[in-house]
Amino acid sequence: MKFQKVNTLKGEVTIPGDKSISHRAVMFGSLAEGLTEVTNFLQGADCLSTIDAFRKMGIEIENTPEKILIHGRGLHGLQAPSSILDMGNSGTTTRLISGILAGQPFESTLTGDASIQKRPMRRIMEPLSMMGGNIVSVNGNGCAPLHITGSPLHGIHYHSKVASAQVKSAVLLAGLYADGETLVTEPTLSRNHTEIMLRYFGADLRSEGKTAHIIPEPHLEGRKIDIPGDISSAAYFIAAGLIVPGSEILIKNVGINPTRDGILRVAREMGGNITLLNEKHDGEPTADLLVKYSPLHGVTIEGDIIPALIDELPIINIMAACADGTTIIRNASELKVKESNRIDVMVQYLSAMGCDITGTEDGMIIQGGQPLHGTEVDSHLDHRIAMSFAVASLVAEGKTEIEGSDVVTISYPDFYADLAHLCQ
Ligand code: S3P
């Protein structure tokens, strides 16, 4: 797709449902007894991979434009999959489902696209094996395809080296099938959607600081879930509204869970004018965000905030490129093992646009304020790279061409239409 500089952004946008929460609604609804009804489900390719996997294990899931109906069969209701389970591009599906499959009385094989087959899976294989799980990387490289032979599991206290909600969730889900209590301690608290939603479904789960404890429960019960808009998707409009002169946009119904709201904290610290309206605080908190164009300045982003904005660092790079002064990002080596190596890819294409950016072992240093110019970008099968450069193009002189731009279907199928709607 080709993109051009725009004058300004005005109007309202309603963000589609949160990807992390949509996955969990399907998974936990499948393991619950009775009907789970989900509204504002994200119809992105990643979440459809999760639906497909549970259908292959005998769960009836009705997917209508208004809602998803999951006819859960209980913790022990899954059937051996009818074929290999295809995770597509979805790390969340792969890692969380592995925790569930480790404790089933059947064998299964998981695979996925070229990106997923390069992503590290030892981080879940290790704790699941400690619990008695039997998970083998078929090619012996610690990546998918994975072959899982379900086995009896025992509870452990796992001290995770990475602050990863996917690792934490895989262990907690395996904990549902263990013979005693399972605990996970993280170096920094990662997103806590699993804890919030499992508790809502009736699991015996409690969180104390950076440790989550789960006691196996004989059953979970079907629930109604209304999924908030995804702050990771809203981030592209937050950035666009802040960097395109004269912009004023209202972004409706955005999840503002404190384990995900790092983008708001950083954007404000950079000088961004963002007002929260219509805040709601039952279950997953939400708000409407009023974003106005603001001159931005560089900041240092490091430490405990990193997991709360890990997926937003590519778009934060674009904001930093448009900000006066230096932005330093540290402690973000996880960027190298996302859908692409997001340090290398951001450095490559932001440099090509004329930005002064240097990659480091665990982040990047950006000297902002240079004018950007259009370039050719390859998305590297990474939805967040495509959306970040689509936003950069709005302030770049000349034409920006994004190869593989349709990868946005992973998390935000209508992204380009919603962006065009705001462009005046
Ligand atoms: C996710 C957790 C994060 C995030 C990913 C979604 C989740 O990954 O980057 O997009 O839904 O649990 P890690 O847990 O590996 O950091």
Image (spheres, helix red, strand yellow):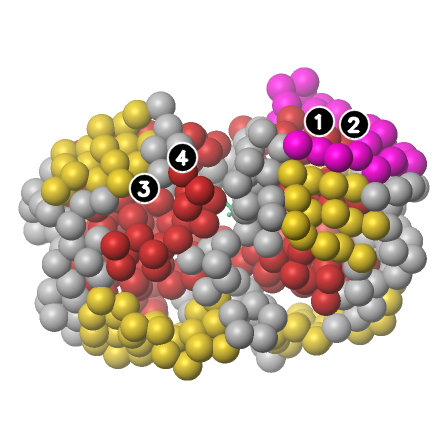
**Residue 49 visible within the image:** yes
Q: What is the C-alpha distance between the residues marked 4 and 1?
A: 22 Å
Which numbered dot is residue 301? Answer: 3
Q: Quadrant of residue 283?
A: bottom right
Determine if the C-beta at disc 1 is less than 8 A from ligand 1: no
Most extreme residue toward the top is: 140
The numbered mark, 4 or 2, whose residue comes first in the sequence reads: 2
Instruction: Please say whether residue 200 is one of the residues in the magenta stretch.
Output: no
* Residue holding disc 2: 130
Of all residues shown, which one is farthest toward the front?
208
Q: CB of mark 4 within 8 Å of CB of mark 3? A: yes
- Give the residue number, with chain letter if any, for mark 1: 126
Residue at disc 4, CB closer than 8 Å to ligand 1? no
Element under disc 3: strand
- Calculate the distance from the C-alpha at mark 3 to the C-alpha at mark 1: 30 Å
Label 2: element kind: helix
Residue in the picture at 43% in, 61% down: 231
What x and y, as percent, mark residue 338?
Answer: 47, 37
